[in-house]
Amino acid sequence: MSSILVVEDEPIIQESLVRLLQRQGHDVTGVASVAEAEENSINMYDLIISDLRLPGEPGTTLISRAAPTPVLIMTSYSTVQSAVEAMKQGAVDYISKPFNHDEMILTVKRILDKTRVEQQNTLLKQEVARYYPIDGIIAHCEPMLEVLDRIRRVAPTDTTVLIQGETGTGKELVARAIHSQSERRKQALVSVNCAAIAESQVESELFGHERGAFTGALEMKKGLIEAASGATLFLDEIGELPLEAQGSLLKVLQDNEIRRVGSNKVIKVDVRILAATHKNLAQMVQQQAFREDLYFRLNVFEINLPPLRERGGDIRLLADTILTRMAQRTHRNSMIFEDDAYEQLQSYPWPGNVRELENIIERAVILKHSGSIDASDLALNNVDTDHQLPLYELENRLSLDDYFVSFVKKYQPQYNETELARMLGISRKNLWERRQRLDIPSRKT
């Protein structure tokens, strides 16, 4: 039952309208003026129906005073101009007197239904904001709440941000969240995976080249940094950037300018840079594998993403969200996890973090046609977790190439090439090229 306030100075019309709406099941109050209406709590009604011409103040006065309560304006003066003026002031709709009873009933129903939907959407948005505060990032554990707080603080600025975390923790998602809340959000986020570009092509891809700058340069090409001017550039796996390209990138951060390969002309750019890495850049600086000056320029504001194994109850929330999304994507009916599946998800160390969680659940959904997913569907018991080191520990003990070889050999029995490349944060082409260079046989061999 909805509560409606009728403001009409003609007693016969007021009484007729009150009775009409009461017969429709509404709780209706009738008054004769704006002043009399304001003796009631006008903001507490679901709808106000008011005559335009009233003694004292016009009915449109209630539009702003009763907001957000919708106000339907009635008038005997059925002119286009009066309708336009009422709507301009914020009236939800306009109806002419004498009105047809059926027309009034339908109009009131439509307004109340629309208001109810809007209220439900508002509540839903509030609920989403509470559980998924920033761009769908699920965060209930303390470390992730700290991440969200840092995103909110740095997003409105143009500050350079260094996002650090193990492979698969969601560094690109954080970059997109920062961009979406920045002043540059109307422009596209330009993403570059530095590990996916061949070393010989890095300078050309990032800074562009002039025609004839090198063999095969048949025409001038803008680089990604120049293309991102006015927007945000996300450099993923910044630790893979060659030293020579690091020097050119430093010029961008210091002076906001670039030079295309083969050109002496300086081009000014306006670009915000977000960088991400799963490597220890400070350690790389000590090993002279990364420029110290560039490291300090990048590390103006740091965001550290916790690994999945340290996120506690977030694992279950993430798993439920991913399961719903995967079921929809693969056109399955709604699916749920059994208790033993939750236990296995919580106890597994997740060396591939959220990316590995997504892959495991996607595979389970594909193999399971319907119903619930139990521990056997996840098949995590088939993985040797007793002697499995997290990726960051492997990385700290091995060189980059050794780490790559160890990772691929360890996980290729469980994952296909697309999944392996995704977990490593590189393209399938880059994975194939590294296999050839490091002489890593595929699982089919």
Image: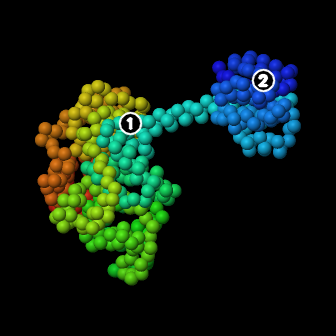
Q: Position of residue 57 (x, y in %)?
A: 80, 35
Quarter the N terminus occupies: top right
Is 122 rendered above or below residue 105?
A: below
Q: Residue at x 14, y 56 (%)?
A: 398
Q: Nearer the viewer, mark 1 or mark 2?
A: 2
Q: Amino acid at mark 2?
A: Val
Residue drawn at point x = 26 percent, y = 58 percent: 431
Q: Residues within 10 Å of mark 1 (few under 14, many from 20)?
A: some
Q: Earlier in the sequence, mark 1 or mark 2?
A: 2
Query: Where residue 396 appears, x then y in whole percent?
Result: 16, 53
Q: Is residue 182 visible?
A: yes
Estimate the x, y position of residue 133 in percent, counting from the top left. Answer: 43, 41
Image quarter for residue 119? top right
Residue 137's disc is: none
- Determine which quarter of the picture holds residue 48: top right
Q: Pointer 1: what residue?
A: 321
Residue 300 lies left or right of residue 409; in this view the side is: right
Identify the secondary structure beneath mark 2.
strand
Question: Disc number at residue 31?
Answer: 2
Picture quarter containing residue 299?
Answer: bottom left
Label 2 Cα neighbours within 10 Å, binned few <14 / some 14-19 / many ≥20: many
Relative horizontal placement of residue 335, taking residue 65 as reference (left or right)? left
Q: Is residue 357 visible?
A: no
